[in-house]
Amino acid sequence: MGVEVSRLSNGLTVATETLPHIESVALGLWVKSGARNEREDEHGMAHLLEHMAFKGTERRSAWQIASEIENVGGEINAATSVETTSFFARVLSDDVPLAVDILSDILTESKFDADELEREQHVILQEIGAAHDTPDDIVFDRFTETAFRHQTIGRSILGTPQTVKSFTSKQLHDFLERQYGAERMVAVAAGDIRHDDFVREVEKRLGTFRPKAESALPQYAHYVGGDFREHRDLMDAQILLGFEGRAYHVRDFYASQVLSMILGGGMSSRLFQEVREKRGLCYSVYSFHWGFSDTGLFGVHAATGQADIEKLVPVILTELQRAGESINQDELNRARAQYRAGLVMSAESASSRASQIARQILLFGRPIPKEELVERLSNLTTERLTDLSYRLFSSKPTVTAIGPIGGLAAYEKIRDGLPRTVAAHKLAV
């Protein structure tokens, strides 16, 4: 049957996908507002708002929210990302009206009680402390902060102890009212669901939700790159080497995803084989590509002991250089197969499928059929990936390292070990 999409009169998009042989329903509300939408004095507010979502409404206490959904065997949760916030549940099909009612209640009638707020602020302060004490977590925060210096897109989602402690109930209400409008929201359900029934439930509870958010969209991101190092007395070092990636909407986005798989997407990838298997220079190495609405980040993460840092980074640089010179057809075919398998496997999970549909609608304005994604993969060539590699790794690098990093080469040496953009190099357009 595929994905069915409707739009309520206030602009809220409702989408469903019936998944055969699944007796439950994954459903939720996704909002195009995340950490990036915060003002300078609101650092961490989107995440705090997500935490406070289940702490009581005008109709339900925090205990009632938890107990009502668990009384029917369901689950409920929320998440904050750089550009979106989501509130979601999983229940049996007969309990969809209850789940929609609770999620809608959270968005429309949350109290943000002062006592609950104080307790949750304390919880987040513990979360911030735990992240700081976990080098393989905090290195990614420092990575984005360095890549997008002094911009909201680069800030930690958690906020700082100072900002989190300063927020009041009124500020949370004001933030929700400014950021959450029906035109920025998507309600999605996947599993044992009928589209008309779900639309009716959503319209009953959110059909009068304010149509437009009052706040402007965030400013355009500007990748700057740079160097961040923090010496710590640890057993191992966390190292990130990154470059400006590609936004969701640009032609090279899917090519960048595939390139990430070829370089460091599994045990057969170039980096894993060369760095870990052949040379034993680290216990973990992989690459990744994050896309945002107007930019992206391509990175390589490695975790290693102090004695191997000096040898490790040059080997990684060599592999990046090689990717700009040659990628063979077998590598491309293997990465395509990995990507296709991921699409199929995600479709077998109602929760993954609901989240995927919501992200596509928020980013592209429509769900992307699997066949269209497969066709985009089929159009990729080794020449295009080689050219993309050359251009990606010619951008100014972002280097982030935490731990016993005395053997790490100077930033200038790392930068000079990367490919250089030359006018004669053919660019893909």
Image (spheres, rainbow, N blue to C red):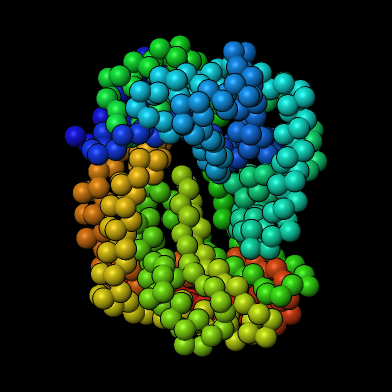
Give above or below for 381 relative to 358.
below
Measuring from the top left, give residue 292's x and y in whole percent. 48, 48
Q: Out of 203 and 296, give the one closest to the viewer.
A: 203
Q: Quadrant where the N terminus lies? A: top left
Specify the quadrant of the image occupied by residue 63.
top right
Specify the quadrant of the image occupied by residue 321.
bottom left
| Left or right of 59 on screen, residue 408 | right
Specify the quadrant of the image occupied by residue 185.
top left
Give above or below for 326 relative to 205.
below
Q: Out of 75 and 306, give the one closest to the viewer.
A: 75
| Left or right of 330 on screen, residue 160 | right
Q: Name the residue: 26% across, 29% down.
A: 4
Give above or below for 215 relative to 275.
above
Q: Name the residue: 51% across, 58% down.
A: 297
Tell me, yes or no, if residue 174 can be seen here: no
Q: How many marks?
A: 0
Q: Name the residue: 75% across, 67% down.
A: 230
Q: Name the residue: 62% across, 70% down.
A: 239
| Left or right of 39 on screen, residue 366 | left
Give above or below for 167 relative to 239.
above
Measuring from the top left, give residue 274's x and y in whole percent. 46, 83
Measuring from the top left, give residue 364's x and y in whole percent. 36, 39
Q: Out of 151 and 137, give the one closest to the viewer.
A: 137
| Left or right of 66 on screen, residue 271 | left
Q: Quadrant where the C terminus lies? A: bottom left
Tell me, yes or no, if residue 239 can be seen here: yes
